[in-house]
Amino acid sequence: MATALITHDACYDHVTPPGHPEQVARLDAVLGAVKDLDLIRVKAPLVAEDDLLRAHPKAYIDSIKDAGPENGWVSLDADTHMSVGTLQAAYRAAGGGVRAVDLVMVGEVASAFVATRPPGHHAERETAMGFCFFGNTAIAAKYALGHHGLDRVAIVDFDVHHGNGTQDLVEEDPRILFCSTHQSPLYPGTGAAHETGVGNVVNVPLPEGAGSDAFRTAMETQVFPRVAAFSPQLLLISAGFDAHEDDPLAGMKLRTADVAWVTERLCDLADEHCAGRVVSMLEGGYDLQALGDAARAHISVLEERGR
Ligand code: ZN
């Protein structure tokens, strides 16, 4: 068994305005950091309409299809901009997650990391926001249920921001457990502990400057036990690397070692409950060096554990 690295060159064509943190260079930072790792390299396909429709209404999908500019940018909100290549990149980012689920579910690989952009965890059912257009991780989870017939899929989101979009897309479906650690208060302002969906949402807000100990304690006491009790058949990770101490957008003050640690522990849970099946998807991470270092640490653990 091995670990897949799923990406597509179209993800370089989602170009954000100058100075935007969710920039093309992020993809090179991730891919460059893992170029020597022994991974099965797979091209992300375009997502199928039916797979998008499990998460987003047709009218919303059509509005995104129609919104793209012929040149320059169209802004869907203050942070979220479409360039000429954005739609294709967004289709590859969502399609990458679907492909990853297929590869892991048929046992072609033990685990997969989807290195695509735009990210997805802020995209709500009918709202693009926070650099995100489609809910890539939620789409992958719903695909695993709908196409592979699973009954229980867990998503753990350790991006420093709350995954409001993922929560919006899954909070009424008890077949999906969504657990998020995030800095609070911080964008997008959601993710309070009392937001629990239908008992399938676990939000663990952490204060600015929380650091390694608070993060690890939150995971050990509030996230891992819930994942274990849920006993997922597939574990998805929304892997945002912006909780790193060098990230310019937040201040949770994690180190690269914390990313390796949480990945190891999530692989332990996957080994215990779902034959090691892990699909991890890139979300945030805006300091290019920290992003590369943390992504490498994360993917290295997946690769070692997948052997
Ligand atoms: Zn983030």
Image: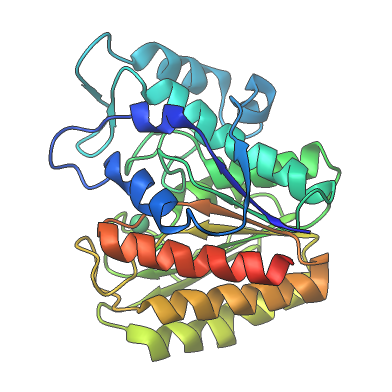
For image coordinates 61% across by 77% down, the residue present is 264
212 and 77: which is toward the camera: 212
20 left or right, relative to 160: left
Q: Is residue 50 above or below residue 269?
A: above
For image coordinates 30% across by 39% down, the residue present is 24
109 left or right, relative to 221: right
246 and 164: which is toward the camera: 246
Farthest-out residue, left:
19
Q: x%, y% of residue 258?
A: 44, 80
- Residue 24 in view here: yes
Residue 191 is drawn in which quadrant?
A: bottom left
Q: x%, y% of residue 194?
A: 49, 70
Which quarter of the figure is the C terminus placed in? Answer: bottom right
The figure's colour scheme reads rainbow
Count of labels in the image = 0
Ligand 1 lies in which image quarter? bottom left
Farthest-out residue, top:
70
Residue 227 is drawn in which quadrant?
A: bottom right
Residue 223 is drawn in which quadrant?
A: bottom right
Q: Is residue 154 above or below residue 281?
A: below
Q: Is residue 184 above or below residue 44?
A: below
Q: x%, y% of residue 183?
A: 33, 70
Which quarter of the figure is the N terminus placed in? Answer: bottom right
93 and 190: which is toward the camera: 93
Q: x%, y% of residue 180?
A: 50, 66
For image coordinates 85% across by 46% down, the residue present is 106
For image coordinates 70% across by 78% down, the residue present is 268
Farthest-out residue, front:
36
- Residue 161 in view here: no
